[in-house]
Amino acid sequence: MKRITKGDTVEVIAGDDRGERNTVLRVLPRENRVVVSKVNIVTKHQRPMQAGRSKTQAGRIQFEAPFHISNVMLVCPLCNAATRVGYLELEDGRKVRVCRKCGEAID
């Protein structure tokens, strides 16, 4: 089970954007990275493509770059605090994420 999933609200705990809270756009589990909206914005200078190819935007393009999953903490929707994630197995066999501060199920 994943600690952080798409759509979760997370808080950045390391780097230039420390303290920012926003939602997760993508999770890259093989690379242990996440993409968070409006965080870790990078600028890429891109040249225009040839006429026969697909049209791409040329010039300076800004986008959210992925960064390591250890640099974010999940924000509990109930207690609104950045927290570590615990796991609990229910009677029906499902495994759910649990807030370590308030003890409530996140999923």
Image (cartoon, rainbow, N blue to C red):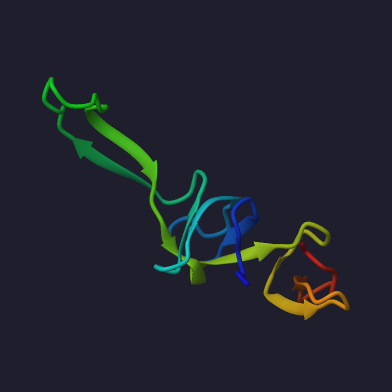
Q: Position of residue 43 (x, y in %)?
A: 29, 42
- Which quadrant holds residue 97? bottom right
- Which quadrant holds residue 76? bottom right
**Where 104 sits versus 61, above or below?**
below
Q: Residue furthest right?
A: 91
Q: Position of residue 5 (x, y in %)?
A: 60, 59
Q: Residue at x 58, y 58 (%)?
A: 19
Q: Quadrant of the C terminus?
A: bottom right
**Where 44 sits versus 14, above or below?**
above
**Along the line of sight, which residue is nearer the eye, 47 or 29?**
29
Q: Residue furthest front?
A: 92
Q: Residue at x 84, y 72 (%)?
A: 102
Q: Quadrant of the N terminus?
A: bottom right
Q: Position of residue 62 (x, y in %)?
A: 34, 38
**Along the line of sight, which residue is nearer the eye, 20 or 86?**
86
**Where 86 sits versus 48, above or below?**
below
**Along the line of sight, which residue is nearer the eye, 90 or 81?**
90
Q: How many marks?
A: 0
Q: Position of residue 16 (x, y in %)?
A: 43, 58
Q: Residue at x 38, y 51 (%)?
A: 65
Q: Is residue 78 left or right of residue 67?
A: right
Q: Is residue 99 left or right of residue 67?
A: right
**Where 67 sits versus 3, above or below?**
above
Q: Is residue 103 left or right of residue 52?
A: right
Q: Is residue 35 left or right of residue 59?
A: right
Q: Residue at x 79, y 79 (%)?
A: 89
